[in-house]
Amino acid sequence: MRVGFGYDSHVFEAGKPLVLGGVAIPGCDGLKAHSDGDVLIHAVIDALFGAAALGDIGSHFPDSDERWRGADSARLLSQTVDELARRGFRVGNLDATVICERPRLRPHVDAIRGRLAALLRVDASRVSVKGKTNEGMDAVGAGAGIVAHAAVLLEECNCGIM
């Protein structure tokens, strides 16, 4: 078994849709990024690559590569899970925390957990997503953007492509 930790942060950008964990969140500006700005999936990808000692999201999907401009982060996560399976890993579980003042995540948590579980190819009971605020502290607390943390457990297996 291997453990990985991921982190990502993005500031809000008016006029873009907000996507968190592969789920469109209505009524809130999106996030400024080279891809779709899904800060939660980016943290999950970093955790997965970290657990497998394969670098980080930027080494696999660099923002200097135009192929990834506006990319659907759910697709990037699927490609990551495929790569890990080829190397003999499968996801054991995910525990993630999203930190923001807006939007309120509670109404979206079940949909996000379900979407992430499908992308990770695990049962939703193996995916935890929590929303927290920063209680007004720092730029995130002032509402400038969103931060996400993710911890994953990878299991070594003879799984090939799942």
Image (cartoon, helix red, strand yellow):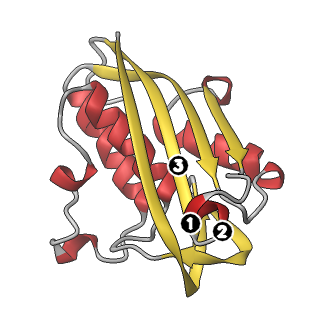
**Disc 1 to disc 2, C-alpha distance:** 5 Å
**Disc 3 to disc 2, C-alpha distance:** 16 Å
Instruction: Give me the residue at 53% from left, 54% from top.
Output: 147
The part of the image, by quadrant, that contains residue 110 is top right
Q: Would residue 8 appear left or right of 122 to someone viewing this image?
A: left
For label 3, the residue is 148
Seen from this angle, which residue lies furthest bottom? Answer: 15
Seen from this angle, which residue lies furthest front? Answer: 137
Q: Residues within 10 Å of mark 1 (few under 14, many from 20)?
A: few
- Disc 2, SS: loop
Instruction: Give me the residue at 74% from left, 53% from top.
Output: 135
Say what amino acid the circle numbered 1 marks.
Ala
Q: Position of residue 97 (x, y in %)?
A: 60, 41
For label 2, the residue is 142
- The tag earlier along the polypeptide, 3 or 2, is 2
- C-beta proximity under 8 Å, tags 1 and 2: yes
Q: Nearer the viewer, residue 78 or 154?
A: 154
Quick check: 64 above or below 84?
A: below
- Considering the image in quadrants, where does the N terminus appear? top left
Q: Would residue 102 appear left or right of 57 to someone viewing this image?
A: right
Say what amino acid the circle numbered 3 marks.
Ala
The part of the image, by quadrant, that contains residue 157 is top left
Quick check: 152 above or below 131?
A: above
- The tag earlier along the polypeptide, 1 or 3, is 1
Q: Position of residue 131 (x, y in %)?
A: 71, 46
- Considering the image in quadrants, where does the C terminus appear? top left
For label 1, the residue is 139
- Disc 1, SS: helix
Tell us which disc is closer to us: 1 or 3: 1
Instruction: Give me the residue at 65% from left, 57% from top.
Output: 137
